[in-house]
Image (spheres, helix red, strand yellow):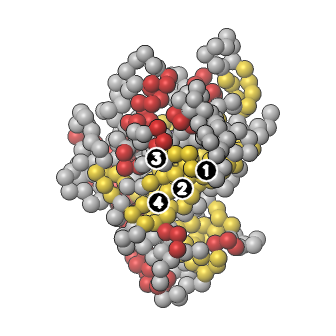
């Protein structure tokens, strides 16, 4: 039975939904329906995926096989997806955001430090990242209120307080940790699939003016922490078996703990990424197409680095790729880059031009990948509308 729109039996993403005034429960999406899977095992009879994800990869595979059989036999109760309310699918623990795109890091370096080497000296040696705010990760569809804060343009003598004037997006991919790891242990680059349950589209909303004034020397803070949107559907890693690909390559070779089998499907031992196509849609118009396959650091390397100091991980922890930007101008994953620091409005004929976001703008990130049945799967979209600041 072919299912439209990339939500066939080769996908089966998990989400949390409610009907009417009911409490959230776990469901699996097939086509335009949500399948009720709460009765399959006690850990699925919950408002979030955390307890199920904590069971680990054997239970994930067993349940996926069971859901596949029951769904193919049309033996699960279903509700039209248009009739449900979707919730944050997992309780977010610690949230880390990386900076893994060479093109993005190079573009940002050129925009902010035009007279210097675009990459800082550490960038090719480790996946740069920062700890974000798990408590303000919101599900797709949640409105994003323009944040207020301190801003100081380079031309101004002193900071002022007020609504961000340079509100931006970052098109990213998020990785959801299912099975955690103990304090004092490390997750090796070969063990990604033992710990990562699945992936979600992610928009790291960013207030560039607040960020630019506050970030030295400790990194992003209030310019990022007001909201991070994730998809309502978690695509299991198993649905991406056909999407693994070699990344462009790394020079110099990283330290030993960042080198290894890479990820599922790796043959040569090099870093492996995912061949996921992203679309940035501004008010119903595609303004960019970032390719995740062009990233420099792999998800397995990010996870190995995140735990190399013995930091523990827990079910529901989330780590994100950083802005996905490809080498071409129309593959940049942030307005900062698309407008080259706000100097070159983009959008052009047929749409309003932008440098940064205006109130009322709706940004939707769409993701698709090769599926295991020869076609493509559509990952859950991430959308948000900008609401005016609340001074
Ligand atoms: Mn980011």
Q: What element carries label 3?
A: loop
Observer able to see residue 191: no
Q: Which of marks 1 and 3 is nearer the N terminus?
A: 1
State the SS at label 2. Answer: strand
> Which label is found at residue 366?
2
Q: Distance between the residues labelled 1 and 3?
A: 15 Å
Q: What residue lies at 34% left-to-right and 64% top-to-bottom?
A: 242
Write the residue at 53% across / 22% down: 216
As drawn, 322 above or below 178 = above
Residue pointed to by mark 3 = 290
Q: Horizontally, is 37 left or right of 271 in the view?
A: right
Q: In this rendering, would 322 be left or right of 384?
A: left
Q: Name the residue under label 1.
A: 285
Q: Where is residue 364 in the image (x, y as percent from the top left)?
A: 60, 52
- Given contact means CB atoms under 8 Å apart, are the residues at marks 2 and 4 in contact? yes
Circle number at residue 368: 4
Badge 2 residue CB within 8 Å of ligand 1: no
How far is the residue under mark 3 from the one under mark 2?
10 Å
Pointer 2 or 1: first along the chain: 1
Of the residues under marks 4 and 1, which one precedes in the sequence?
A: 1
């Amino acid at each position: 039975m072919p299912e439209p729109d990339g939500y066939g039996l080769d996908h089966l993403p998990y989400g949390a939904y409610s009907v009417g005034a009911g409490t959230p429960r776990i469901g699996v999406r097939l086509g335009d329906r949500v399948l009720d899977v709460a009765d399959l095992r006690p850990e699925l009879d919950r408002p979030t995926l955390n307890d199920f994800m904590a069971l680990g990869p054997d239970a994930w595979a067993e349940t996926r096989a069971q859901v596949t059989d029951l769904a193919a036999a049309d033996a699960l109760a279903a509700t039209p997806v248009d009739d449900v309310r979707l919730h944050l699918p997992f309780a977010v623990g610690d949230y880390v955001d990386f900076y893994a795109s060479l093109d993005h890091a190079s573009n940002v370096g050129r925009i902010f430090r035009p007279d210097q080497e675009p990459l800082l000296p550490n960038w090719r040696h480790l996946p740069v990242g920062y700890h974000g705010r798990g408590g303000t990760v919101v599900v797709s569809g949640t409105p994003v209120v323009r944040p207020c804060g301190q801003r100081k343009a380079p031309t101004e003598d002193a900071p002022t307080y007020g609504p961000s004037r340079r509100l931006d997006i970052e098109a990213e991919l998020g990785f959801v940790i299912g099975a955690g790891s103990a304090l004092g242990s490390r997750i090796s680059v070969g063990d990604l699939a033992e710990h990562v349950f699945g992936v979600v589209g992610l928009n790291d909303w960013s207030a560039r003016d607040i960020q630019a004034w506050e970030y030295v020397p400790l990194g992003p803070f209030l310019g990022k922490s007001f909201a991070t949107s994730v998809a309502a559907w978690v695509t299991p890693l198993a649905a991406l078996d056909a999407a693994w690909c070699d990344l462009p390559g790394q020079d110099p070779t990283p330290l030993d703990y960042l080198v290894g089998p890479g990820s599922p499907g790796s043959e040569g031992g090099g870093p492996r990424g995912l061949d996921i196509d992203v679309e940035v849609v501004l008010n119903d118009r595609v303004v960019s197409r970032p390719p995740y396959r062009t990233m420099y650091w792999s998800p397995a390397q990010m996870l190995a680095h995140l735990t190399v100091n013995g930091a523990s991980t827990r079910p529901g922890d989330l780590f994100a790729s950083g802005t996905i930007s490809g080498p071409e101008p129309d593959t940049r994953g942030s307005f900062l880059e698309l407008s080259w620091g706000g100097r070159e409005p983009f959008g052009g004929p047929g749409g309003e031009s932008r440098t940064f976001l205006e109130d009322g703008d709706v940004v939707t990130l769409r993701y698709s990948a090769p599926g295991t049945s020869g076609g493509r799967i559509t990952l859950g979209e991430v959308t948000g509308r900008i609401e005016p600041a609340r001074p």
